[in-house]
Amino acid sequence: MAGGEQLEVLHALDVAKTQWYHFTAIVVAGMGFFTDAYDLFCISLVTKLLGRIYYHIEGSPSPGTLPPHVSASVNGVAFIGTLSGQLFFGWLGDKLGRKRVYGMTLMLMVLCSLASALSFGHTPTSVMATLCFFRFWLGFGIGGDYPLSATIMSEYANKKTRGAFIAAVFAMQGFGIMTGGLVAIVVSASFRAAFPAPPYAVDPVASTPTQADFVWRVILMLGALPATLTYYWRTKMPETARYTALVANNASQAAADMSKVLHHQVDIIKTRTNNDQESNVSDSKAANFGLFSGEFARRHGFHLLGTSATWFLLDIAFYSQNLFQKDIFSAVGWIPKAATMSALEEVFRIARAQTLIALCGTVPGYWFTVALIDVVGRFNIQALGFSMMTLFMLGLAVPYAHWTSPGNHVGFLVLYGLTFFFANFGPNSTTFIVPAEIFPARLRATCHGISAASGKLGAIVGSFGFLYLAQSPDPAKADHGYPPGIGVRNSLFLLAGCNLLGLLFTFLVPESKGKSLEEMSGEAATHHDVPPNAHV
């Protein structure tokens, strides 16, 4: 049960008008997510180049590619690091405070972005091993950014626009993906102009100039720049009032911290805290239950199951969508056969294609969520997103032979883009937002970290499990080094089933639109001093 002093401070936050500091917090937290997306997704832009540089086979009619186990390691090790970081830093953020941990994650991201680009070794194996090592720790830092950024933004925001603020932080991920593509376009085009090279079919060795080894390193290294620029501002952010008041039990310090941003309410908060002694927020059994207690299971067990399961199922579908990007890009002529291009031209074309997908399908979906989440609610957006993703996946799967035949690629591309749109204007955004709103303050970052880690587990399943499943049942048609699978069409049916399950688990997650964090978590259940229905 919360004392009057603490909830008075938090009520002041809930009813505060939107002001400049809110936008500063969005930018500071959002730049972390910008960097997260850049670092996680830019590796897919350079894996083909890595194969050409380090795994060239003399006399082969096609360029070198990463062996399946190396490709899985290079792409997947960051996901494993992210999953670990989400659990560890989520727990640490609840133990030590959001502010004390927030700078650690960003510095880890900066250092490991630079180190990834400087991966060393005398053999391809040693270079890939070094790259994987640093990308694991890069992912570890990225993982910490998920629960901390979401929790900090939710605890700073007022209840009227809280959803939009958290969504805006997450939406920076779209700009990070798009910027990664633009950087790859500029870098590859610059090197291609400076060091012209023939297609692989003309001269296999000369098609990959020596200078190409710098291209992937520059692209990875530039991921450190946005995080570096915002590190200072992260260190200057005060601890959130909700953590200070509800976890550290220091209402006067919470008021002092918030006086820096709620200038028009300084006198009210100071009067409240100077006239009263500090009171213990966690003075009852109900306020002290732990994550593994029966009380937590009774109050929030189904909520945590809902947030974790929906994020897990969403990421299976979301991250598996890149399995048929190659079919689309080849069908529409965006990416010709590898042997007809030089190494740098291939990087350029892959980056251009992924940037167009991000611009047309990914970024708009995020910002539709920002605009509408506090109008139509989290539940409606998530349910709509899962429903539409199910329909579009079935729309791709049922007539798959039709879509992949010559002349029908435009329809495939439209459905593919709409699937991405409704993932982002849907569960990809809401699964990030809701766990930061519905759990108690002392467990908020931990529960968000558990939910996010479940999502990354789904990403691993989607990226690598379906990479094998989607292989052709005909061994002769399966990609080199992969066993036969069930094919893309049957994989799409499975993914549609994942989306349908996600829709069902959505019903376990409560609607938080227009409610304070304390109302959602039950921390204000018995408090009567602050009007429960006060409006901003």
Image (cartoon, helix red, strand yellow):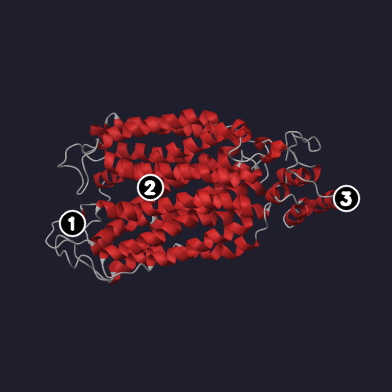
Q: Which amino acid does label 2 sit on?
A: Ile
Q: How crowded is mark 3: few (under 14 residues within 10 Å), some or many (20 or more)?
A: few
Q: Nearer the viewer, residue 3 or 393?
A: 3
Find residue 340 and report its horizontal and vertical position in percent. Answer: 18, 57
Asked if disc 2 and disc 1 are in contact, CB closer than 8 Å, the reply is: no
Find residue 229 and report its horizontal and vertical position in percent. Answer: 54, 65
Q: Is 528 situated left or right of 430 in this image?
A: right
Q: Distance between the residues labelled 2 and 3?
A: 58 Å
Can you identify the residue that label 1 sits on? 339
Q: Is 221 situated left or right of 344 in this image?
A: right
Question: Comparing marks 2 and 1, which lies closer to the viewer?
Answer: 1
Can you identify the residue that label 3 sits on? 275
Question: Comparing marks 1 and 3, which lies closer to the viewer?
Answer: 3
Q: Is 241 situated left or right of 44 in this image?
A: right
Q: Distance between the residues labelled 2 and 1?
A: 24 Å
Label 2 vs 3, first from the N-terminus: 3
User: Secondary structure under badge 1?
Assistant: helix
The reply to whether residue 414 is visible in this rendering is yes
- Label at residue 357: 2
In the rendered image of this protein, does residue 118 appear above or below residue 365? below
Residue found 27% across the figure and 37% down from its top: 488
Q: Which amino acid does label 3 sit on?
A: Asn
